[in-house]
Amino acid sequence: MKPWDDRAYEGRVNPKGIPCLYFATDRESAMSEVRPGIGSIVSVARFEALRDLVVVDCSRFAQPFDREQATFEDDDIENLVWSHIDYAFSRPVVRSDNTAGYAATQILAEAFKTEGYDGIIYKTAFSHDGHNVALFDLNCASFIDASLFRVREVQFQFEQAP
């Protein structure tokens, strides 16, 4: 459920030792984010915000950017930057990734936090419609309930690597 104050693992938004609350906007995205194996039991909890939250929505421009159609006016460049920021947060992490690869998103998250934001929203790589939400304050959301799910099927799609 909530991470322990003194035992936080490193994540896209938080460095090791500094806890953060990670949520998803729907249960399928939440379960997919933990990448469970077939037969695994996954606990999914619901939380509610305890106050109005101000978050940076990095997913606002999360869509393919067509360089050929772009005029590279200020709006196009801003959209491209936000699209890349969203991709950096939502990029699936694999076991072979070096945790130093989190540094860029952790720095961005710390900048947002310093500016007074409560958290970040970014697309999940596991759903077309799902989003992830990372909140900086462990006490800004309260547990409502939880359910257990057994993983029946996992689908993969493959493409040849360059």
Image (cartoon, grey):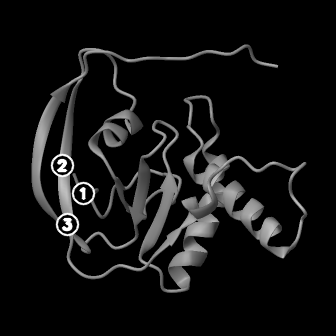
Residue 67 seen by the camera: yes
User: Would you name the residue on which mark 1 appears?
Assistant: 2
- In the figure, is residue 3 to the left or right of 109? left
Asked whether disc 1 touches disc 2, contact meaning CB atoms under 8 Å apart, the reply is no
The crowd level at tag 2 (other Cα within 10 Å; few <14, some 14-19, many 20+) is some
Give amino acid for label 2: Ala
- Per the image, label 3 sits on a secondary structure element best described as strand
Residue 14 seen by the camera: no
On residue 150, the disc is: none
Q: Nearer the viewer, residue 105 or 28?
A: 28
Residue at 48% over, 52% down: 10
Image quadrant occupied by the C terminus: top right
On residue 48, the disc is: 3
Residue at 48% over, 45% down: 124
User: Would you name the residue on which mark 2 appears?
Assistant: 45
Give amino acid for label 3: Glu
Q: Earlier in the sequence, mark 1 or mark 2?
A: 1
Q: CA distance from mark 3 to mark 2?
A: 10 Å
Q: How many marks?
A: 3
Q: Is residue 158 above or below residue 14?
A: above
Q: Nearer the viewer, residue 11 or 4?
A: 11
Viewer-side label of 3, 1 = 3
Residue 68 location, x and y as percent? 90, 48
Q: CA distance from mark 3 to mark 1?
A: 13 Å
The crowd level at tag 3 (other Cα within 10 Å; few <14, some 14-19, many 20+) is few
Q: Is residue 33 above or below residue 26?
A: above
